Amino acid sequence: MIRKVNEQELSNCVNVIKESFITVANDFGFTIENAPRFTAFATTEDRL
C-alpha cells in the first residue's frame, strides 16, 4: 500500500530505508567512509 507520510512518521521511514539499504552496502563493501552518499548512510529526516 502506498500512502502519504506525516511528519511524525519520518523517523520510522528513515529507519526502514536505512535498514533496507544496509544489506546492499554490506554485500558490496560500502561504508560511510567510502560511500558517504549511499542511501544507507545519507538518508536523514531533513533529506526526506
Image (cartoon, grey):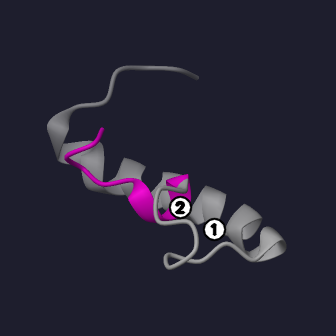
Q: Quadrant of residue 19?
A: bottom right
Residue in view at x 30 percent, y 54 percent: 44
Indicate left or right for 4 with 22 as reference.
Answer: left
Total marks placed: 2
Residue in view at x 31 percent, y 30 percent: 5
Which numbered tag is attached to residue 3?
A: none
Q: Quadrant of residue 34?
A: bottom right
Crowding near pointer 2: few (<14 within 10 Å), some, many (20+)? many
Residue contact at pointers 2 and 1, CB within 8 angstroms: yes
Foreground residue among 16 and 33: 33
Tell me the magenta residue range: 39-48
Crowding near pointer 1: few (<14 within 10 Å), some, many (20+)? some
State the image coordinates of residue 25 (x, y, percent, origin top left). Answer: 69, 68
Indicate left or right for 33 with 47 as reference.
Answer: right
Residue in view at x 58 percent, y 23 percent: 1
Image quadrant containing the C terminus = top left
Q: Secondary structure at mark 1?
A: helix
Which numbered tag is attached to residue 40?
A: 2
Whether residue 42 is in magenta: the answer is yes
Foreground residue among 37 and 27: 37
N-term-proximal mark, 2 vs 1:
1
Q: Amino acid at mark 2?
A: Ala
Indicate left or right for 30 with 37 as reference.
Answer: right
* Magenta stretch, overall SS: loop
Residue in view at x 40 percent, y 48 percent: 13
Foreground residue among 32 and 12: 32
Q: Is residue 24 above or below residue 10?
A: below
Residue at image mark 1? 22
